[in-house]
Image: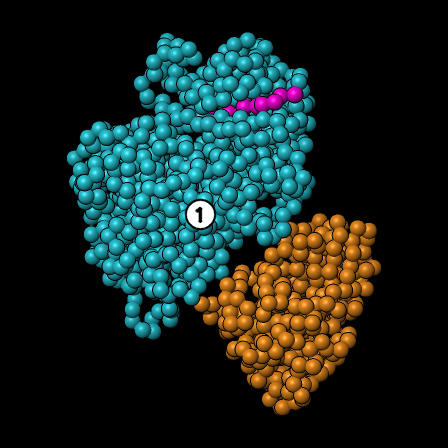
Chain colours: A orange, B cyan
Amino acid sequence: MVNVLAATHPEGTVYGEVGDVTVPLRFSAAPDALSQEYAALRERAAVLDLSGHRLIEITGPGAVEYAQRVLARDVEYLTSDRCMMSLVLDDAGQVVDQVLAFGREDGILLASSCGAGTRLLEHLRAQADDGIEIADRSPELVLVGLEGPYAWGVVGRLIDGELASLPFESVVETTWDDVDIVFARTGFTGEYGYQMIVPREAAAGLWSLSLEHARPAGQEALELAMLEVRQPMPRHEATPGATVIEIGANWLVDVTKEAFVGREAVLAAFESGTGRRTIGFTCADGVPAAGTRVMAGDQVIGEVVHAVHSVGLGTTLGLARVDRDLAAAGLRLSAGGVGVTTLTSPYIVPKSWSIPII
Amino acid sequence: MALRPVVVTGLGIICAAGRDPAEFWRRLTTGQGGLTPVLDEAYAVFEARHAGQVPEEWITSQLPAADAGLDRTAKLALVAARQALTQAGARAGVQAGTQAGTQAGTQESAPAGGPGGSVIAEPGRFGVILGKCQATPDVAGRYQPMHRTGDVLAERLELRGPRILVSTACAAGGNAVGLAMDKILTGEADAVLAGGVDPLLFGTYAGFAGLQALSTGPCRPYSRSDGLNLGEGAAFLLLEPLDLALARGAVPLAEVAGYGLSADAYHATAPDPTGRGGAAAVRRALAAAGLSPQDVHYVSGHGTGTPANDAMEAKVMRLAFGERAGQVPTSSIKSFLGHTLGAAGAVEAVAGVLALRHGVAPPTIGFDTEPGDAPATDLDFVPNVARPMTIETVVSNNYAFGGNNVSLVLTRPREPRPYEELPRREAVITGLGPVTGAGTGIAEVSAAISAGRRAAGRAPSLDGRTYAPRSLWRHMNHLSRMAIAASRLAWEDAGLKLPRKALDDVGLIFATGAGSSESTGGFDQSIALNPNKPAVLSFSNVVLNATGGAVCQTLGLRGPTTTICNGGASASIALDCALELIRAGKAEVVLVVAADERAGGPAGYADQDGVVPTPYEAGAAEPVPGSAAVAFVVESAEHCAERGGRPYAHVLGTSHAPHHPTDTPPRATADTPSSTPPDTADAASAVGRGIAAFAGAAPGVVVGAAQDEREAAAVLAMGAGGVLTSSAALIGDCQAASGAMNIALGALAVRDGIAPALDGLTRPVAGEPGRYLTDPALPEPVARALALTAAPGSVYGAVLLGAA
């Protein structure tokens, strides 16, 4: 899918394919583009092109009941002023996607993870029953994000100061530059975060407005910042066969809910007490590829799930999935012959945690 | 629409910053704070030791000997209340605010007349509305009913008009002043003594210490904001209509131009960080006053000195006053006297009136002006030095646990002017939500009534469905769960489907006799074990409005909200508040929810089938205590018709009468033979006065509250052939929830033609068995039903419902 905002992105923007969408990875071809964008995200405020997150609306008399069945968290009382993150699982308990669910007056609106919209939509339609309608709203609506320790100030300048200090996961309908939008306090990076659902035809204009107060950050900076606070990224972490518990996304599942698709599999995984667990690690040399074996002495105990160079740490940061008894911080292990040290998350403490909104 | 102007004609105050209004004002304007270290050894366990304490001598020197045996709450309240009456009674020409204290100090007991015998109002039209946050320990430290202090005031000061105990925690004092204004606007009272009181209590101190909310030194609101100091005190304002005040030659000190209430619907203790809730209260208050933000000269802030409050309040200022925020001086007097909780709003209203009178804004003392220490701000907190300035309009704000906000608008007294009566607007009950031992939801309860079940003593069941998001539910105590379930059931029963925006204006009135005994017990136990390890989650639920706040949070209601604590009469008083909101155009839909639980919580239950006494049977045992929550939706008839709702009943009228058990018996009348013992005689006349308003209404069914001889006699004396029944066998005695259940049953009888039968009744306490309902299916449709509520020793209530 082409990028809605492509026309507004600067020349030199580096695009990449993520799932079913083309997204800006970096907004410049300059060698320091990633670190510049990352710095905006962690030090000031960055505007995020989230147009690759598919917006899917579920309406009809059975909408809430259906959403309650297909989402792994409890959304029965998700009112139109709240949103929450949840996993969508299949019957085998495998992760279909991780969504941001917005309560709406007449149903629920889901934002898929980046590039996962087609897969999510197929799954939702396969699960659909009478009394609900599932509509792909991405032809009309676009998601734009704003995150960073001073993102609240940008919200104040751009939209409305009152909204900056909205409680986490609160949603309001408001206007931005006379355009009706849905505004939510939420985010991916541990920094102050906001997401705006805007009409597609107004998206480019609002994006350009944002650039007067914040610099854009691409998918690479965003995913790096997500990794640093252990925000799950299904496209990297939901490897085939891995259970929710192995992925470490238990918090996106609510087993106290009586029924939802995949619940039995999750419970079985909980009860089995076996399997691997995911842990962060760092290493001095190189970035091990996903699938690299992780060793404790001469024993294979797991494999690397995902690793990158962390601008914040100045070194490698990765996730490994290892035997559950060894999924602890502070262990010296090796991956592909290189020594690695396991870490406790978050791996970077977001600056927002020590900055009050004034 | 200009409503009848309501003015303040008397002030009374006793707090750490002064024993009377004159001393209080002198100290506020000269920056002499009253925070001192607590010397009581019991407090040595806490790191934070500063508090606003009232010297014992200030109390004893102002109280007659007859009051010496009262508890501290009542003593503080009486001192301040008498000062207000004394000043209000002063004839024109006596300078206001200067002699009240000294006069009160030598006064024996000033009845409602004030000095010189000047009659302010007939006792029956003289009300008392008291705000209070904490429980009411007697001299030995045992809990008394929450409304006890109000009853003491009413008895000692001969106030026999509307009597309300409002307990919206730290917003209660301001809320009381607003409700007093309503009682004058509805015409129920010609004068109301409104105020707040709270003493310094060890448990509360430990709770705030446990929340890490106390400052280790004197608090420094709006600058260091490193915590609050607790304080104690009482403050009262005497409110009356401007025309009557002038007619009797009183000096109006200020007008109460309007007030606004709101719910944060955000969190049990933390304020909504956006300031939306606080700003909504200010906007509503200004709208009620017919004023705009431009008219406001000074804001008396809540300014507790905690970081959460002070940061939120700055946002309220910006939201409410926009670009003018920096030009509207706002100060907190809490650094003079500490946070007096339920009294704070009244204390600050007194300060607001004095600020108007003298044209001086009191300062925020302890304000840190050194650069670099405080976050940069454009707001004007009147740092450290009082400021003479033109003040025509004051806004006084308070924010409380449970997310209850209140804003009062006070103005300099204006000339008498034409006014309109508060419009009469028809209101209907459109949804019922009982959560009782007899069933959960109106369908189950109706079935139980038809089957003649006696479920008194049975615990309500909340199994089988959900009522709230699990993430909230799991932190709720039992009382809040019952209240949430009842509220949601009433809401669903009413068939209300309102968009988010409309929910911002839906009111919620919570009624409870004693709040959560589970949380109170748990908290007290934790303090007894170790004062430095209080059960903080329980502490946040000890305030009586916590459950109301939890309902607002769960249902997302952000309209006007308050909490009424008048024992078994709470629900009918809460209904009054709902009707006033609708009449004043402040809400179209108001949810009234009443909840109480038996001591010991759900575990206190045993299967008590077979031992349920028959109400009104001569010699029957006391009703079985129980737990329940009952909610009903009150809606303007207009709103209900527009949405095609199906009402249960019209609310045709409400009436309340005081009951003073210590009174001398009134002269014998038809319904109170002179041979009856004094208490019985007075109670009967109290019930009688309550229902007298509906003497000609001929209700087909009366749902009684007290189930005793005096009530039965008074009802049967009404004449018309209606039958008497009760909810006591069906659900037990559930205090405030029983009152709400009676109202719900009255509404059900009118629409669906059923009511609980008193089978087994053979020897009624009064009248013939034929005057009691013995078959749940009413023989013919009833056009009217009368529901009674009762808080013996305090207030009796009556609600007349008619077919819709």
- Assign the N terminus of chain B to one quadrant of the image: top left
Find residue A23 and report its image quarter.
Answer: bottom right
Question: Is residue B96 placed above or below B683 in the rendered structure?
Answer: below
Q: Residues within 10 Å of mark 1 (few under 14, many from 20)?
A: many
The amino acid sitting under disc 1 is: Ala
Q: Which residue is mark 1?
A: B288
Residue lying at the far bottom in this picture: please name it.
Answer: A31
Q: Is residue A289 left or right of residue B11?
A: right
The percent position of residue B113, horizontal first and vertical second, equals 25, 30
Q: Where are the magenta residues, as a range?
A: B781-790
- Relative to the observer, which residue lies in front, A91 or B323? B323
Q: Is residue B422 left or right of residue B665?
A: right
- Relative to the observer, which residue lies in front, B212 or A170? A170
The count of marks equals 1
Question: Is residue B718 placed above or below B39 in the rendered structure?
Answer: above
Helix, strand or loop for disc 1: helix
The answer, for residue B277, to whether it is visible in the render is yes
Question: Is residue B20 placed above or below B774 in the rendered structure?
Answer: below
Chain letter of the residue beneath label 1 in the structure image: B
- Relative to the observer, which residue lies in front, B592 or B648? B648
Going 81% across and 64% down the picture, which residue do you hit? Answer: A122
- Relative to the observer, which residue lies in front, B488 or B278? B278
The percent position of residue B6, horizontal first and vertical second, equals 36, 41
Find residue A188 and report its image quarter.
Answer: bottom right
Going 65% across and 62% down the picture, which residue do you hit? Answer: A85
- Assign the C terminus of chain B to one quadrant of the image: top right
